[in-house]
Amino acid sequence: MFQATRRRLALWYTVVTAVLLLLFATGVYVYVRSTLVERIDDTLNHVVEVVERSLVIEPVNLQIDQLRVNVEASFRNNADTTEDDHIDLEWFSPTGELLWSTLSEPLNIPIHNHPNGETVRVVGMGRWGDSNPHSAASIQDSALLLRQVTQRVQRGRQVLGYLRVSHPWFEVTKPSRQLIFDLALGTGLMVISVAATGWFLSGKAMEPVGESYQRLKQFTADASHELRSPIALIQTNVQVALADLELAEDYRQQLKLVERLTQRLGKLVNDLLFLARQDSGISKEVFSPCPLDALLMEVVEEQKLLATEKEISLTLNLVDPPLELDPELLENSFTLIGNWDQLVRLFTNLIGNALQYTPVNGKVTVELTRLDSIALRYTNSYLQIKVSDTGVGIPPESLPHLFDRFYRVDPARTHQIAKTATATTTGSGLGLAIAQAIVEHHQGQIQVDSILGKGTTFIVTLPISLEN
């Protein structure tokens, strides 16, 4: 129980920290990426300003009001300066015709004024495939992303042309990929470190709780053990007093009431002592081969008296084992390693509960089946026992708490049972908790399926041989 709580605490530490680290890493990535984009846009705008100032503008046919850009004189020295920065220039006429470019092939992208920067997608046939060997495979003859700034150049109202500056997008994606790898690696290492730290800290946090729980279990065991003697003494004295033939009838009835209450209290103390020993691991029961079919026959035979009184049909079905089973094991196909007394107590509780919560003329069926390892994908064979009844059923909201100690289903259900099954419930709420403890002690599982108003089925799965 404490190990499961410790695992949950460590898991919560790890999950919360992982979410926070993921949010932090995402924020860092978005910030760095936007910074790279802004830096490229600033560079492109700076190139546009420099080139625009270096343009050689002259009149057309000596007309002062008609101007044009001397392309040869304006862009003669710009190709060399932009080559080292992976920046390409394109100059377009006022009508959008490409007049000059540093690209080996035109991009075939319609020209439009966009001074704030945009990302475009083209076929990578430009010069970047040669100037950047690390990205050649992904650029040449493939889709290429470019960051572009397009500026309209004009004097007064006259448009002289359009200047477009392009920069390869891999200058952003390459450091971004490296950043993603670094952030993922750092986040992964941090999550592993937090998981280890969380496991250590949760263990430290659970130590005082575990010590308190151990002291409580020890107190329960000691108190239960010490209570057994006075309860047995009271019960003995009451039986001696009841043996007196001259005892008045009023006193006799009172003593019988004391005897019943003492028996109930003794059963409760024995149940608490059993659970305390199971929890503390001091139980010293010896496990030996137990023929479960014979055990169930014995328990069913004992419970048939109560079933007959309540007019309930109680039957036991033994499902034949598979024919391909080893002939040497076929005779002992329903034999498992366990403790006879505990298993008798387990199935007595389950069958007794089924009879108690089943109305008159109802049915209780006990079924024993052998499950091979292939069906459950286990390395061991299992025996499955189903205890089914046609009783009042269990509300769905009560199923998760059914095996909690001292848990009792809604009293309305008990009242319904008293009316339909003519039975009184005097249990302490420990029967199913004891059943679960016995099943877990035998390394098995217990489940319950119930439909309100139709019946309940308890399914117990026990391994034939126990693991060390």
Image (cartoon, rainbow, N blue to C red):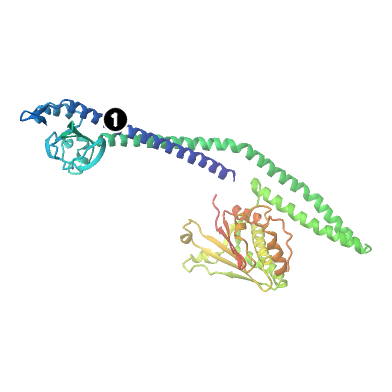
Query: Height in image: 35 above or below 237?
Result: above
Quadrant housing residue 363:
bottom right
Quadrant housing residue 318:
bottom right
Q: Residue at x 42, y 35 (%)?
A: 24
The image shows residue 309 at horizontal and vertical percentages of 73, 72
Q: Nearer the viewer, residue 425 or 129?
A: 129
Q: Is residue 133 left or right of residue 14?
A: left
Query: Height in image: 397 above or below 210?
Result: below
Q: Nearer the viewer, residue 157 or 178?
A: 157
The image shows residue 420 at horizontal and vertical percentages of 70, 69
Mark 1 lies on a secondary structure that is helix
Q: Residues within 10 Å of mark 1 (few under 14, many from 20)?
A: few
Question: Is residue 243 something one can see in this rendering?
Answer: no
Q: Is residue 26 left or right of residue 335?
A: left
The image shows residue 14 at horizontal and vertical percentages of 49, 39
Q: Residue at x 73, y 62 (%)?
A: 425
Q: Nearer the viewer, residue 334 or 353?
A: 353
The residue to which callout 1 is attached is 39
Callout 1 amino acid: Arg
